Image: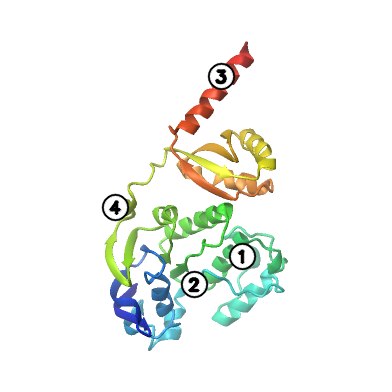
Amino acid sequence: MIRFDRVTKRFGRFTAVDDVSLEVGRGECLALWGANGAGKSTMIRCMLGLHRFKGVISVDGLDVRRQGRRARRLIGYVPQELGFSDDATVKQSIDFFAGLKGVAVPRLDECLGAVGLAGQGHKRLRELSGGMKQRLALCLALLGDPPVLVLDEVTASLDAAGREELVMLLSRLAHSGRTMLFASHRQEEVMRLATTVAVLERGRVDRRVAPAELFGPAAPANEEVVLRLMVDQPTSQRALQILRDRGHEAYLNGVGVLVAVASPRRAAPFEILAHADIPVKDFEFVEPASPCMTAARSAAAASNMRGER
């Protein structure tokens, strides 16, 4: 579906992409992985026709230089940084981009509902959170139902809750038969989205591997994972109670809340706290048998025994 054939891009004496050949098959989700400056974003920009380059890039057989307009119609693109007008409403933005793409204006509730923004069409963009703006960007990328989705570090500027919500949406798209090419520096995103990873070093493809080969196997679907959610101290007790009221095993741990969930439901605590207007500043995964989780469970068990007496 996507093919890079001996692609090279130089900026003066610096070679950002060095003789890269790479293919992304139809329905495949390929992640570009590498340090800053490895060439990930430059490859994407060459594919979109934003940089001149040597070599050939094609999308479904269309040369992006000679048949650029037709090739770009097959691509939905979500950039790292958004360029929206803050005074425009969500509906106005959708109408504008549909006109630019030359596609029919979609039913508003239908297209916004697909990215978790149902009922937000009247809002001005300055009223949206960072996560909501990125979901709108995904909505705009999907206008016209392009078979290829290209994403460039789309969660880089989001908080923990925003990242999780967007990755959940992308995960559904990645498993729906759509071809995806994305750059990321977050291991968790690559593990959840990618079928294959191209590891870039100094502008070259060092190797192409499965995510499990690069990072180790993912957690089984029925395995428990423990999240440490970092929240502001004044809201930690309320966050704990809300999670427990919704049936989650949760404990306070310093400035964070430990919460145990089944692996497929890892987004649930973020959604619960977001609905309660409790921001999650950051998060990390903790081993279920880690000392902090073991101590929290032991303390809770001891407290329950004292209560029974």
Label 3 – label 4 distance at C-alpha: 42 Å
Which circle's residue, 4 or 1, is located before the other in the chain?
Answer: 1
Relative to 226, say whether 159 is above or below. Answer: below
**Which residue is disc 1 drawn over?**
133
Residue 10: give x, y in percent of width and height: 36, 82
**Which residue is disc 2 drawn over?**
77
SS at circle 1: helix
Label 1 – label 3 distance at C-alpha: 46 Å
**Which quarter of the figure is the N terminus placed in?**
bottom left
Q: Circle 4: is it few (<14), some (14-19), or many (20+) Cα within 10 Å?
A: few
**Which residue is disc 3 drawn over?**
302
In this rendering, position of residue 145 left or right of residue 244: left
Label 2 – label 1 distance at C-alpha: 14 Å
Residue situated furthest top in the rendering:
309
Label 2 – label 4 distance at C-alpha: 28 Å
Where residue 254 sits, quadrant-wise, is top right
Residue 216: give x, y in percent of width and height: 32, 48
